[in-house]
Amino acid sequence: MEKNYFGISLLSEYVYCQRSFAYRLIEFKPHEDENYFIVDGRSTHQRLDDKKVSYNREGLPEKRSIYVKSEKIQATGKIDRVIYCGDTVRIIEEKRGRLRSNEQHDLQCQLEAYCFEETFPEPKIEACLIYYQKSRRTRTVAWDNNAKNKIETLYNEIKDKCKDFALSKFDQVFDSRCSGCMFEKTCGAD
Ligand code: SF4
């Protein structure tokens, strides 16, 4: 039987604005937008060995676009780059803009790491990094038990709210985030 998984990008939207997360969830139509809900994650059929290896400036091997999936948090998505450093790996999320702190980016990278650990128990994760293409700089994101606990708490909160779904359960932010939001015109009118 097919099973729905939250896309990692959708889950990370929750810390940006819960209401925006809810609108995106409603709008999702299976098979039309893999960013949000993904039907029957592909990672079950993928092996890390299948991916082509390239070498970065440090001479370390890396693989791109690695599909990962977690049954525990019902999530799946794709990691931009995985760098191999002997017995460990670095998880890299790439962003277009300049280096900045951003809670949503952090969560996205941590969700990828969480799903990676469940999909590939070895090798262990050495670091989670976000690479900002415009400034060509990299930021390190915490990857420890606190990060894992935060993800599980967040997932349980989302799961509870989705059980008897109602938009009113998902908080609006009413601040600068609303400017330019694709839901700005209709937000709150439901
Ligand atoms: S308009 Fe503001 S509150 Fe509404 S979904 Fe967008 S960011 Fe959230």
Image (cartoon, rainbow, N blue to C red):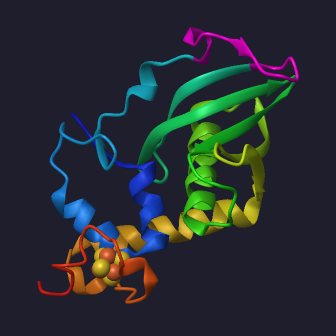
**Residue displayed at 13% across by 87% down:** 189
Membership of 184 in magenta stretch? no
Pick the quarter of the image with the N terminus: top left
Q: Which of 50 and 177 is in front in this view?
A: 177
Left or right of residue 181: residue 149: right
Residue 179 rendering spot, x and y as whole percentages: 36, 78
Q: Nearer the viewer, residue 185 or 61?
A: 185
Residue 27 visible, this orientation? yes
Question: Is 112 located above or below residue 90 in the figure?
Answer: below
Q: Using the image as rendered, state which of residue 87 and residue 60 is in the foreground.
A: 60
Quadrant of ligand 1 in image? bottom left
Residue at 22% across, 80% down: 167
Q: Decide: is 152 above or below 118.
A: below
The stretch in magenta equals 48-61
Q: Indicate whether 103 appears above or below 142.
A: below
Q: Is residue 51 magenta?
A: yes
Q: Residue at x 18, y 39 (%)?
A: 32
Residue 14 in which image quadrant:
bottom left
Q: Position of residue 40 (x, y in %)?
A: 30, 34
Q: Tell me: residue 160, above or below residue 7.
A: below
Q: Position of residue 101 (x, y in %)?
A: 68, 66
Q: Quadrant of the C terminus?
A: bottom left
> To which quarter of the image does residue 106 belong?
bottom right
